[in-house]
Image (cartoon, rainbow, N blue to C red):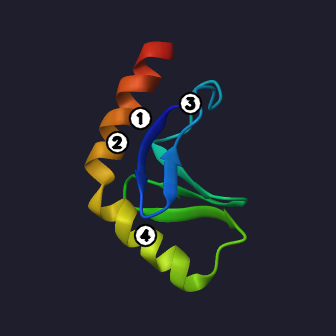
């Protein structure tokens, strides 16, 4: 589980085994037991969430959008190594 970043109390990561073929670029977010998954392309969008409220998800959308380039680069770099 490569951790890409820790921002504002959240851990942003992805899993090394995301299926065959791998899912499109996305990032997982966790804080304690709460978690969410965001698609990065073609636009940032919420894929799923568990135990996160609306204001928290809105903040996460903003954070993911601001860091989208970094998340996409990390995803392609890591997934490219395991294909």
> Within the image, what quadrant is residue 1 found in?
top right
Q: Are marks 4 and 1 in contact (CB under 8 Å)?
A: no
> Within the image, what quadrant is residue 53 found in?
bottom right
Q: Which residue is at a point 51% across and 51% down the rendered structure image?
A: 11
Q: Answer yes or no: is residue 57 visible.
A: yes
Return the residue at label 1: 75
Tell me the SS state at disc 2. Answer: helix
Q: Do the residues labelled 3 and 4 touch (CB within 8 Å)?
A: no
Q: How far is mark 4 from mark 2, CA to CA?
A: 15 Å
Q: Residues within 10 Å of mark 1 (few under 14, many from 20)?
A: many
Tell me the SS state at disc 3. Answer: loop
Q: Answer yes or no: is residue 27 visible.
A: no
Return the residue at label 2: 72
- The correct choice, above or below, for 58 with respect to 7 in the image is below
Q: Which residue is at a point 42% across and 24% down the rendered structure image?
A: 78
Q: How far is mark 4 from mark 1, CA to CA?
A: 18 Å
Q: Do the residues labelled 1 and 2 touch (CB within 8 Å)?
A: yes
Return the residue at label 4: 61
Q: Which of 20 and 50 is in front in this view?
A: 50
Mark found first going from the N terminus, 4 or 2? 4
């Amino acid at each position: 589980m490569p951790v890409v970043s820790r921002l504002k109390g959240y851990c942003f990561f992805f899993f090394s085994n995301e299926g065959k073929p791998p899912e499109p670029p996305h990032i997982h977010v966790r804080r304690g037991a709460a978690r969410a998954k965001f698609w990065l392309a073609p636009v940032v969008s919420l894929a799923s969430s568990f135990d996160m409220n609306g204001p928290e998800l809105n903040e996460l959308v903003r954070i993911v959008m601001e860091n989208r380039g970094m998340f996409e680069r990390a995803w392609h770099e890591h997934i490219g190594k395991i294909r």
